Image: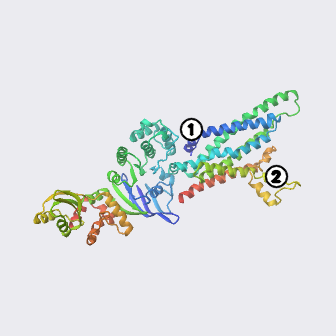
Amino acid sequence: MFAIYRKEMRSYFINPIGYVYLGIFLVFSALLCCYTTLISASYSTTTYFFYLIMSFIILVPILTMRLFAEERKLRTEQMLLTAPVSITGMVLGKYFAALTMFVSGVLVSCVNLIPLYVIAAKETSSSSLVHIGPATGQIVGSLVAVIMIGAALIAIGTLISALTENQLSAAVITIGVIAAMILLNVLNQITDSSGQPLIGVYAVRFVIDWISVMSRYTMFANGLFDYSALLYYVSLAFVFLFLTVRVYEKRRWG
Amino acid sequence: MIKIEHLIKNYGTNCAVDDISFEVEEGEIVGFLGPNGAGKSTTMNILTGYLSSTSGKACIAGIDILKNPIGAKKMIGYLPEQPPLYLDMTVEEYLNFAYDLKCCKLDRRTHLDKICETVKIKEVYHKVIRTLSKGYRQRVGIAQALIGNPKVIIFDEPTVGLDPKQIIEIRNLIRGLGKAHTVILSTHILQEVQAVCDRIVIINKGKIVANEKTENISNIMTSNRRFNVKIAGPQKDVLAMLRALSGVSYAESLAERDGDAYTYMVETDFGVDIRKKLFYALAERGWPMIGMEALGMSLEDIFISVVDQSEESKTTRIVPQAKGRKRNQASAPEQEVGAALFADAQKKRAESALSDTDEEDED
């Protein structure tokens, strides 16, 4: 498992893909931070994290598309599957490599928030009674949630990559699925001219809310640490990784 | 070392491997021979744990590949049909990855050094695999299979796409491996198994149609059953005489001509030596024999006949294949006698090559 993890990490940096991912992610998050906080003269990071999650629609497939699809196409998976490594070990090795890339991107992007604290430090010195500056608790909560959402989405991407032989189709399908999971709850927020919600049936609204990754994120955005949501993201990751293992088991019996 | 029992693999309704059983002893090099799509690769993939069998058992050194896949896989080095190379890695990175992947306990430096020396890839050790030629890629694939000194090495068509010099090198390499490892080798190149293997297993349409020691097969091949005879005399009469000669199953006149002498191809029944008889018969009629050349039977002939026969009937017989020629029907029963060599492979393996020849003579 560690051999596969190391190999995946190395291949992110032998290929341009690791640099492309980190480059896009860091530039995008920096610009986003500028626009949502500095330019709009706000300490609130809610919008920043909200749009950051939106960017995963494009960014997560970059990490996951080649995980299995490429191995299958080049027939190198035969080496992994005939080596003394379990299928679970192989899947986890690859998954954690993608997750490591993702988490390091998110952690590095935290430097975006430093200017907020610098400015806050200046302002606080003049008036000491009121808290001025970004809400650190909310930021930490959001970061944890962002990482957990990423972990769930990467598991979805992993499964899709295991199902396809072509990196491009893996990427396109992953974009579609992740977009659906992130944007679905927008449907619930649409209202018609009279202010009534577009989807009137409660059951449908409930299901959409349940599937949507974003609806669970609102708690974090409001500064509440929601354990049930974390459990949901972890279970999502677990289920999709389990399915990936099953895909490989099934292919063996095919 | 390797034991396969009643192995069956179905792909949907398509049966790729149909009840195969065989064993490979320690230190043996076994050639797995068969036409494309015969089930060679499928069998190897099951042996290496890449695929699962529908039913049946495959054991490596007594470990069932289904029950303890990781334990069994530790004993195997596998080179699939297409070498599983990461093109963006250097040979060094790749072999180190294989070393880690196989959880190899041997000393990394000396072990990798030794392997590189064996397969002669030292000069490309720091190159990116993408830039390597086909021959080198194949060798890197073999190097990968050797890492960890596995007891069993499985090669799926190791010499495909190599030039003749490389083919010879790889064959020598495999023969060298046979001393310390058990090797299974699949190929459809017949000289290859003849040159390298101790035993030949011919498989067709998912079934084993022959399982015989190479030397036994070589005996059949060298037993004089076909001759080119150059005889000076009237072509038609000579041909008629040859066909009438008892023990001759088939005769034809070839296009070759040397003065008034024509060349004839004569095929005899199994186990019959007609050389003396032929000489006296010709002397009687006053037709001088200018030359005689034993053609033997090529492995191709055996292979094609075994495969064809298995498609026609369940019993396997060796019949020299005279492609596109009419065959003398009367000789069919005698041919079956020789066929016993293959049909009764189990029994034969116990007997020495010498007793095989004796038996033929008695027939």
Q: Secondary structure at mark 1?
A: helix
Q: Within 10 Å of the Cα at label 2, are there few (<14), some (14-19), or many (20+) other Cα atoms?
A: few
The residue under the point 44% across, 59% down is B37
Q: Chain of mark 1?
A: A
Query: Is B81 rendered above or below residue A107?
Result: below
Q: Amino acid at mark 1?
A: Ile
Q: Position of residue B319 (x, y in %)?
A: 30, 65
In the figure, residue B261 lies in which quadrant? bottom left
Q: Position of residue A193 (x, y in %)?
A: 87, 54
Q: Which is more N-terminal, label 2 or label 1?
A: 1
Query: Is B173 rendered above or below residue B201?
Result: above
Q: Is residue A250 visible?
A: yes
In the image, B14 versus A130, the foreground residue is: B14
- Tell me the CA gap for discs 1 and 2: 44 Å
Query: Is B336 rendered above or below residue A85?
Result: below
Q: Amino acid at mark 2?
A: Gln
In the figure, residue B351 lies in which quadrant? bottom left
The image's mark for residue B208 is none
Q: Which residue is mark 2?
A: A189
Q: Position of residue A160 (x, y in %)?
A: 63, 52
In the figure, residue B240 lies in which quadrant? bottom left
Determine whether, in the image, residue A125 is placed left or right of residue B274: right
Q: Secondary structure at mark 2?
A: helix
The image's mark for residue A14 is 1
The residue under the point 26% across, 72% down is B330
Discs 1 and 2 carry the same chain letter: yes
